[in-house]
Image (spheres, rainbow, N blue to C red):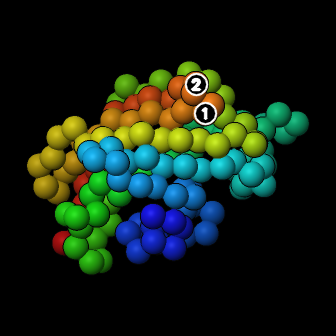
C-alpha cells in the first residue's frame, strides 16, 4: 500500500500519516518511512541534533500494524491505541534514516486487537513494543 491507499484505511492525514508504504507479508505487516529531516516533530527535538521522538516511533509501529486489521474494519471505523507495553528504545533514529517496521497481531477479541512490533534502521533494532487497539465507530 502506498500513502493514497493507506488513507483509505487510516484516518491520519498530512503530518500524521507516518508511513510511505506498508505491505502484508503473510501474518506480518512490513512498513517503511524515510525520515526526510523537515518533519514537524524534529523542529524542537533536538535543535542541532534532531532525533525522532520515541512516541513518533510508536505511532509508526501502530500505523503499520493497522494494515493487518483492514479485513476486520468496517467503513467509518477507526483503530485507536488502547495501550502500550514493554516499549524499549534501543537506538536513535535521525534524518536520512529509513525505518522498516515489522508487526504482527498476537491476539484478538473484537473490537480489541493486540500486537507486537519492532522498527529497524539499517539492520539495527531501534524500538520494540507490545501494543493494543480498539476499533471504534461501530
Name the disc covering residue 105, or none.
Answer: none
Farthest-out residue, bottom: 75
Q: Position of residue 20 (x, y in %)?
A: 57, 58
| Among the 4 quarters of the image, the one containing residue 79 | bottom left
Regarding residue 58, the answer to whether it shows in the image is no
Q: Is residue 109 left or right of residue 85?
A: left
Q: Is residue 27 left or right of residue 97?
A: left
123 and 103: which one is in front?
123
| Among the 4 quarters of the image, the one containing residue 49 | top right
Mark 1: which secondary structure? strand
Regarding residue 96, the answer to whether it shows in the image is yes
Report if the CB atoms under discs 2 and 1 are less than 8 Å apart.
yes
Q: Residues within 10 Å of mark 1 (few under 14, many from 20)?
A: some
Farthest-out residue, left: 109
Q: Quadrant of the N terminus?
A: bottom left
Q: Height in image: 15 above or below 27?
A: below
Farthest-out residue, front: 25
Q: Position of residue 97 (x, y in %)?
A: 69, 40
Residue at image location 27% in from the left, 78% down from the top: 75
Residue at image location 22% in from the left, 73% down from the top: 74
Amino acid at each position: 500500500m502506498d500513502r493514497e491507499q493507506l488513507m483509505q484505511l487510516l484516518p491520519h492525514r498530512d503530518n500524521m500519516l507516518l508511513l510511505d508504504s506498508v505491505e502484508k507479508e503473510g501474518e506480518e505487516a512490513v512498513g517503511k518511512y524515510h525520515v526526510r529531516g523537515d518533519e514537524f516533530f524534529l523542529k524542537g527535538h533536538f535543535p542541532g541534533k534532531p532525533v525522532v521522538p520515541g512516541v513518533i516511533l510508536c505511532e509508526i509501529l501502530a500505523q503499520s500494524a493497522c494494515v493487518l486489521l483492514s479485513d476486520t474494519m468496517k467503513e467509518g471505523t477507526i483503530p485507536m491505541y488502547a495501550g502500550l507495553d514493554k516499549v524499549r528504545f534501543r537506538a536513535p533514529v535521525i534524518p536520512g534514516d529509513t525505518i522498516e517496521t515489522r508487526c504482527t497481531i498476537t491476539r484478538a477479541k473484537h473490537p480489541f486487537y493486540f500486537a507486537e512490533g519492532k522498527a529497524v534502521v539499517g539492520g539495527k533494532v531501534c524500538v520494540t513494543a507490545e501494543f493494543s487497539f480498539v476499533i471504534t465507530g461501530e
